Image (cartoon, rainbow, N blue to C red):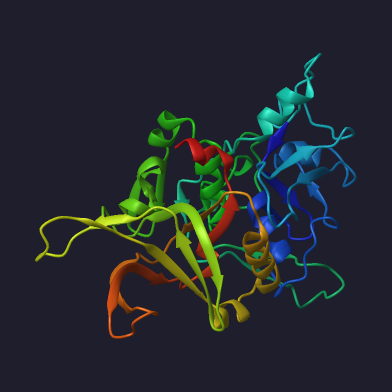
Amino acid sequence: MKFDTAYCLSLDAKLSIYDVRDLNFDETMAFDSAKERFQCPNDACRAAFDEGNRLTTFNAKNINYIRTPHFKNQPTTQHIEGCPYVSPKTPGLDAQSVEADDDREEHFPSELLLTRRQYVRKPSDPSKDVEAATRPTSPTLSSHGDNAHSAQDSTPDKTSVFAHPVECFVSNFADKDLLKRKPLKIGEHTAPYASFFKKIEYLQDNKGLIYWGKIKEIKDYTLSFRIDFEAKVWSKHPDEAKKKPYSVTVYLSKKLIDNYRKRKAFLAEIKHAIDSDAPLYCFFYGVTPELKQVPSKKNPEETFGVFSANIENLDHFIIREAPGLAEG
């Protein structure tokens, strides 16, 4: 059985697998999920066993992944009767069925928080790892509770990690009805996942969404990376008779990357994307490409139109493989 929340002993908090991935790559904090101890997020179940009763992770440290990250039981993991995280003993369950189960994120956060979760070390006892984790969100993120089936045992309803809602959208892309039912809120804007994730060619429909599209090319310049999308935006000026196609481009400042808390992982992700022959997709939130006139390289006196934007927050930007999107 897979699930995306677990109790982390060193942080004394329940973390989603996406929190764990974020911490693994964060250069401002010492954290290695391979050395951490994770246990069942059900408080009553966890209290019934010693610290040796642990869970393990899947895709917690892979920078580039296709199959959905998650926690899972080890062969020796025990649960109390009635625990929602117990693995069903299903005779004859084949590897293909297990793999299919791993390919979809089932826990949809209803809100992407724009304030990142903060972890504070306890200075009074330096011999211990991080003792507390705080998040400026709802009480459902508390790591303690007496009710074995309380809201605290379920996956947090909110997340500050962009990869979580992206994975929900990507891994469930074929289930259009599900994406239309699930709501997502970012800032003051709320819409179904199906509407919040907007194809790049329709970026003029609404601002403040998560825009995504297939990458055509990534250019490595002295001061920035430029990402060109395959799809074009059809638009026209007020003085034009009809619409015409415009390219869409986003820029990643190398100065922004150099100051990023996950710099090494991000550069590895970009290098992989540049060298990869696989179809890649880009997702970003926080900026909306606008139509701009830029000088032509062949004739600097001439200009041409392009929808362009500079990425402002790398926490809200992802490049990844997503085979299921090719059919959309």
**Residue at the farthest bottom position:** 301
Residue at x-position 49% and y-position 65%: 227
**Which quarter of the image is occupied by the C terminus?**
top left
Q: Position of residue 97 (x, y in %)?
A: 71, 23
**Residue at the farthest front position:** 298
Q: Return the residue nearer the eye: 85 or 50.
A: 85
Residue at x-position 15% and y-position 65%: 237
Q: Position of residue 71 (x, y in %)?
A: 73, 42
Asked which quadrant contains residue 180, the reply is top left
Asked which quadrant contains residue 64, the reply is bottom right
Q: In this image, 91 relative to 252: left or right?
A: right
Q: Is residue 72 above or below residue 260?
A: above
**Residue at the farthest top position:** 91
Q: Is residue 196 above or below residue 251?
A: above
Residue 16 in view: no
Q: Return the residue nearer the eye: 79 or 325.
A: 325
Q: How many marks?
A: 0
Q: Return the residue nearer the eye: 143 or 300.
A: 300
**Which quarter of the image is occupied by the N terminus?**
top right
Q: Position of residue 213 (x, y in %)?
A: 45, 52
Q: In this image, 311 relative to 295: left or right?
A: right
Q: Position of residue 81 (x, y in %)?
A: 76, 24
Residue at x-position 63% and y-position 49%: 278
Residue 73 in view: yes
Residue at x-position 75% and y-position 22%: 88
Asked which quadrant contains residue 238, the reply is bottom left
